[in-house]
Amino acid sequence: MSSHRNAAGVLDAPVPCDGRVVDLPVADYDWIRVLVDADRTGAETVWLYYENAVEPEYLHVTVIGTAHARIAVPRRERLVGLRLPECSGTEVLSLEPIPSTRPMERGGA
């Protein structure tokens, strides 16, 4: 995965929604707060990269222009990255992963 963040996990500069993967600090999160600048509204698929899985989730953009959105992180596993949607005319201005307050589930038999 390529990195587009500084040590604090915040993007250094706007990142176009062109399908790229953004590394995140490895941790368990509840949400990812996103600040986007979009030229259209709608729901776009993002891919959440966990240590042991990849799953789709949605970025819901509700207004044209600069807006706050959030991406749910439903799996109780450590997240390592996020693949942005391929959505021309939309840029991610910031990403803020919100640490989970729920206990992690441990698999195994």
Image (tube, rainbow, N blue to C red):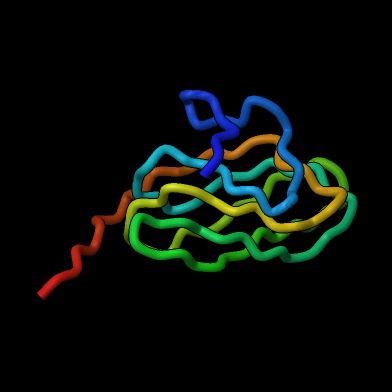
Q: Nearer the viewer, residue 6 or 70?
A: 6
Query: Percent position (x, y) of residue 57?
Result: 57, 65
Residue at the spot x=55%, y=39% of the render? Answer: 2
Most distant residue in the bottom direction = 109
Location of the C terminus (image quadrant): bottom left
- With 27 as the anchor, is 47 left or right in this view? right
- With 94 as the anchor, is 8 left or right in this view? left
Query: Percent position (x, y) of residue 92?
Result: 71, 41
Q: Nearer the viewer, residue 56 or 3?
A: 3
Q: Is residue 103 above or below residue 75?
A: above
Most distant residue in the front direction = 1
Residue at the spot x=43%, y=53% of the render? Answer: 30
Query: Percent position (x, y) of residue 69?
Result: 66, 50
Residue at the spot x=63%, y=64% of the render? Answer: 58
Q: Nearer the viewer, residue 17 or 58?
A: 17
Count of numbered tags: 0
Q: Is residue 78 above or below residue 7?
A: below
Q: Quadrant of residue 94?
A: top right
Query: Percent position (x, y) of residue 40?
Result: 88, 57
Q: Is residue 82 above or below residue 26?
A: below
